[in-house]
Image: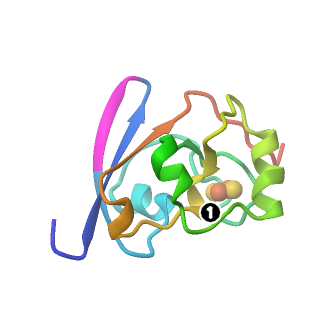
Amino acid sequence: AGKNEFKVKFIREGKTYDAYGKAGDTLLDVIINNDLDFDGFGACEGTLACSTCHVIVPQAEFDRLPNKPCDEELDMLDLAYDLTKTSRLGCQIEISADLDGIEVTIPATRHDARG
Ligand code: FES
């Protein structure tokens, strides 16, 4: 990884995937740019319409995410399956030096709120 690249570790169905991105990339961007084949993830392309980008963040990183969820994100999270107290939408989390090495869990089930 170059000096502007930060690491994200995705955990999905018991497997881990190392990925890299730049400051300002969302977790959805990182998944796309690293060609991770997470079927159905990010179906609305980050427009806060689907909840398929639901991720679970460790408490420590969750507490220091710079942006709190907006009302639209909270509405979408209400529709996500396997919701936890540290759930967010992956299209709304931007990586940064502060989050370098973050481990993000992707729930096994997905719900596309667009029906
Ligand atoms: Fe659809 Fe995030 S990609 S809400």
Q: Can you give x and y, in whole percent of width and height, for residue 33 in the image?
A: 37, 63
The answer to whether the residue bearing label 1 lies less than 8 angstroms from the nearest atom of ligand 1 is yes
Ligand 1 quadrant in view: bottom right
- Decide which of 98, 77 is in the foreground and name it: 98
Give, as a single range, the part of the protein colored magenta: 14-18
Query: Does 16 lie within the magenta span?
Result: yes
Quarter of the image containing the N terminus?
Answer: bottom left
Residue 42 horizontal side relative to residue 57, left or right: right
Q: Can you give x and y, in whole percent of width and height, for residue 102 in the image?
A: 37, 50
Q: Return the residue at label 1.
A: 45
Q: Can you give x and y, in whole percent of width and height, for residue 59 in the image?
A: 51, 42
Query: Does 21 lie within the magenta span?
Result: no
Dividing the picture into quarters, in which one does residue 100 lie? bottom left
Disc 1: CA contacts within 10 A as few (<14), some (14-19) or many (>=20): some
Dividing the picture into quarters, in which one does residue 14 lie? top left
Residue 76 horizontal side relative to residue 27, left or right: right
Residue 91 horizontal side relative to residue 19, left or right: right
Q: Main secondary structure of the magenta part?
A: strand
Query: Which residue is at a point 56% across and 32% down the rendered structure image?
Result: 107
Q: Can you give x and y, in whole percent of width and height, for residue 42 in the image?
A: 59, 53
Residue 20 horizontal side relative to residue 23, left or right: left
Query: Which residue is at a point 67% across and 28% down the rendered structure image?
Result: 82
- Decide which of 62, 111 is in the foreground and name it: 62
Q: Is residue 4 above or below residue 92?
A: below
The residue under label 1 is which amino acid type? Glu
Query: Which residue is at a point 47% across and 58% down the rendered structure image?
Result: 27
Q: Is residue 84 above or below residue 46?
A: above
Quarter of the image containing the C terminus?
Answer: top right
Query: Which residue is at a point 71% across and 66% down the rendered structure image?
Result: 47
